[in-house]
Image: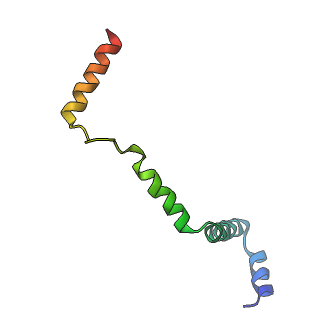
Amino acid sequence: MTREELLSEIERLPLAERVELLEVITRSVREEIQPRARREGTVGRLRGIAKPDGDVPSDEELKEDYVSYLTEKYS
């Protein structure tokens, strides 16, 4: 199929289908411009953001800390 034939076929599509096609093409171009490796690197850097500095406290320690916090707050 030539470029002209493709453009002609696209123009004959209903509006909803042309919008859907536009979204697919936009996503494809965006992925090519911004490579996946760069995005995966960002995710990898963010994974450790919530990691505690030391050992993870047990459920019981968390409950005790929360009770202490509430006691101080409302005393």
| Foreground of the two, 25 or 11 | 25
| Foreground of the two, 24 or 18 | 24
Q: Position of residue 32 (x, y in %)?
A: 63, 72
42 sits to left or right of 75:
right
Residue 47 vertical position relative to residue 62 in the rendered view, above or below: below
- Residue at point 61%, 68% (across, down): 31
Residue 46 vertical position relative to residue 70 in the rendered view, above or below: below
- Residue at point 35%, 14% (across, down): 73
> In what quadrant of the picture does the C terminus appear?
top left
| Foreground of the two, 43 or 17 | 43
Residue at the far front: name it: 54
Residue at the far left: name it: 60
22 sits to left or right of 70:
right
Quarter of the figure with residue 72: top left
Q: How many marks?
A: 0
Q: Position of residue 26 (x, y in %)?
A: 67, 67
Quarter of the figure with residue 4: bottom right
> In what quadrant of the picture does the N terminus appear?
bottom right
37 sits to left or right of 5:
left
Q: Position of residue 38 (x, y in %)?
A: 55, 64
Q: How is the image coloured?
A: rainbow
Residue 60 vertical position relative to residue 21 in the rendered view, above or below: above
- Residue at point 22%, 25% (across, down): 64
Q: Position of residue 45 (x, y in %)?
A: 46, 54
Residue 3 vertical position relative to residue 25 in the rendered view, above or below: below
- Residue at point 54%, 61% (across, down): 39
68 sits to left or right of 4:
left
